[in-house]
Amino acid sequence: MPAPLLITADQVNCLIHAYFLDSGFQHSAFAIRMEGRLDQSPHIKKHIPRGELIELLSKALLYSEVEAHWKGDELSTNCSVPFSLLDPHACSLQPHSSTNNIREPSAAKVNGDTAGKRKATTPSEDARAEKRARKEQDEKDAQMNVDGAPTPKPKPKDAKSDPPQALQEPPTKKLKHKPSVVGARPGAVRFLLAHKTEVFVVAWNPATKGQLVSGSRDAVVNYWAVPSGPNNDHTAPIQPTLTLPDLTLDSQADLTALNWNHDGSLVAIGSYDSILRICTASGETYFKDSHHKGPIFAAQFSPSGQWIATASLDCTSCVWDVKQKRIHRQYRSHGDACCLDVEWLDDSTFASCGADKVVHILSLTATGPLHTLEGHAGEINSVKCNPSRTRLASCADDGTARIWNIENVHSEKALPPPVILSGHQQCLTSIEWCPVTAPGEPELVATASFDATARLWDTVTGACTKVFADHTKHVYAVTFSPDGRHLVTGGGDGSLIVYEVKATIQSKEKKWSWYTGEKSGIFEIDWQSWGNTSLIALALERQMVAIVDPGKVPALQSS
């Protein structure tokens, strides 16, 4: 007789844990990992392909369909009623029969109701949420493509029924541009290939030309010296100058944050293993601390580099004294809600945001928040200060961003009401200020969203000046060039798209784009300049870092 089917609660928990991570439900993933004691599971270190739970459920539905429609010795294929995971199938071939359409409950049940932990509707197999995608082993997509003049894509249809919080992925559309190397000179795009898992974070050293650090899911940090200029050999492979392998033995040790101090002498490393690490530019460990009891989502040096602030899933933010190598203070202002991001306003004041839907303005000396900024209706994912440190931008799962006037942040008077940026159909993943504003012009911010679009906003009036609808999946990253002339976006569809900021207000045409291949999301983008040299680093799902040299892309030089 055939071997019996074996399904254990531990296996199911590991599948659900992987699904939560794939979908960006970090808090739910942490909860099931702790409550299910998955750190002790023999399955937790196994590679679970992205969307495995959805694939298994889809196959189960197919089996149920065959079971319900098998009549005699043949399969009826003209039933018009779809199958659902939760609803009994009312077969259109038997409109007057109900007893045949009700399935008996399975003998194997898992105690407990997880419905309350769902943050959004379940994505379909072809629409998997990829806020934090896993590696898809499919070598047929290995070819990398550069596109200089793609045909603009039509805008996606407006989502009429999905609320802003829904994390369903937009319908997949085929890329309009064909694989080519048009629009860029040789060496315009190079690849750094030392990582063995998805690369989540990249950061250029602001002071040392071409020095880059990158971090991946397996807790490996690589230091790179990226050559630039007309005389370097673009065919020569680039090897890491230094590798910090296996920073932790924790099975869940994704690197989540990399941040250099202002003079490029130290880099802060945030990780899922809850440990803050600070390393020197040469890779030596300067300081590490395990004060947090949950994954660290953000780590940022203060403007002078004297302090570093962190945000953690343990519901706290912390500030460390960098010179003294010790914790200065831990803040529990978000109560039982996790802290998702931090941003320094000046060298003694910072903002923190979290799952409690508020932004707190905190001081190194005050006992409580100086101000609490309320109004968002969803978890706040990111906060960013403008270059003059007079306004703060926040973006959230409610599909909106807000611009807060913080000029009088140290006053006891309440801050003015925010300017609300509304228009996205799903949650926002990131927000960035344009680093340069011409005299007499309003400051601009760009937002990226799970609705497959990015937008450019006038922060004074709150008007959306441009919608960028060229991506076909979630947009994870958005940033400006250091001179403020270009806006670049990257998403789950594997496309990097560069726009000219001024031209986009009147034009719909893309400036330049590059395609990495299917199932190769771009998780983070860092564009840095040193004098006349400018380079773009991309953290890729396909276990590598891509380097784009704008100086070798004529389309980016003609504006």
Image (cartoon, rainbow, N blue to C red):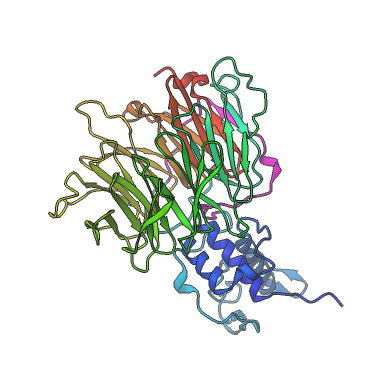
Quadrant for the N terminus in the image: bottom right
Observer-nearest of 374 and 325: 325
In x, y percent, where is residue 11?
Answer: 66, 70
Where residue 515 sits: x, y (%)?
56, 34
Magenta highlight range: 127-156
Residue at 37% over, 41% down = 305
**What percent of the width, then of the height, locates residue 122?**
51, 63
- The one of 347 and 161 positioned closer to us in this rendering: 347
User: Residue 63, located in which quarter of the rendered image?
Assistant: bottom right
User: Which residue reaches farthest right?
Assistant: 1
Please identify the residue farthest to the left as the structure is shown. Answer: 413
Can I make out residue 516 in this image? no
Which residue is drawn at the image coordinates 65% and 56% (left, top)? 49
Relative vertical location of residue 517 with respect to residue 395 in this rendering, above or below: above
Determine whether, in the image, residue 297 is placed left or right of residue 108: left
The magenta stretch spans residue 450: no
Q: Quadrant of residue 90?
A: bottom right
